[in-house]
Image (tube, coloured by chain):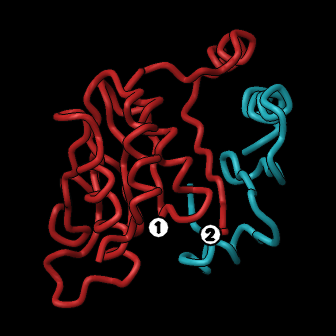
Amino acid sequence: MPLLNAKVQADVRKALEGMTTPVKLVMFTQAAQALECEMCAETRALVEEVAALAPADKLTVEVKDFLVDTAAVETYKIDKIPAIAIVGAKDYGIRFYGIPAGYEFSSLMDDIVTVSKGESGLAPATKAAVAKINQPVHIQVFTTPT
Amino acid sequence: MLEATEFPHLANKYEVFGVPLTVVNETIRVEGAVPEPMFVNELLKVLDGQTK
């Protein structure tokens, strides 16, 4: 049974119409394990359903095994699963850890479209301010599914 | 984005009592959804040595 009902599927299709350039979702799970962790399995099913609703060739899913695909784990600096890296023309460092359910599902859609466009939509003043940052910055946003 | 209930050790480490909670470079904490300019002000603290 699909995770997304017909109404949500329609909403996702509409949201992803805004995509311009291809995006890949690099999904980290433990696919090679006999028992895929519960939220990993659900998250993987979710991103696969979402990708199927995007305009043709715009959104792909690469499934990686957290324990086996160590090169990818290192490339994307993944330290826990389930994890989704949203990668477009470049890797903007956007990661989702845990299932993007509830409000975070909208965040995932927004982030996919933002990465596809390569444009953050931030105010000019914000862009000017953050341009001054000359060191790596780690931003963690904690949420709960609501 | 981190789903706090799936990573209780991190929720515990960063003392997540309400969401959203944003943690920048381990030390800057921003609670709730704040307007963009306010978040930028917090973010820029990474520049003036207010964080480790």
The shade of chain B is cyan
| Residue B31 percent coordinates (x, y) | 84, 53
Q: Is residue A15 left or right of residue B30?
A: left
Residue A112 visible in rendering: yes
> Could you tell me which residue is drawn at 75 percent across and 11 percent down?
A125
Badge 1 density bin: few <14, some 14–19, many ≥20, Cα 10 Å: many
Quarter of the image for the C terminus of chain B: give it.
top right
Tell me if B33 is positioned left or right of A119 in this view.
right
Quarter placement of the N terminus of chain B? bottom right
Look at 46% across and 42% down and name the residue there: A94
> Which residue has dot 1 on it?
A99
Q: Residue furthest bottom?
A: A34
Q: Which mark is residue A145?
A: 2
Q: What subunit carries mark 1?
A: A
Give me the residue at 48% from left, 67% from top: A98
- Give the total number of marks visible in the rendering: 2
Tell me which numbered mark, 1 or 2, is placed earlier along the sequence: 1
Residue B39 or residue A59, whichever sits in front: A59
Name the kind of residue labelled 2 in the image.
Pro
Residue appearing at x 55%, y 23% in the figure: A120
> In the picture shown, does residue B47 fall above or below A53?
above
User: Label 2 marks which chain's residue?
Assistant: A
Q: Amino acid at mark 1?
A: Ile
Q: Can you give x and y, in whole percent of width and height, for residue A95 in the image?
A: 45, 49
The x and y percentages for residue B19 are: 76, 62
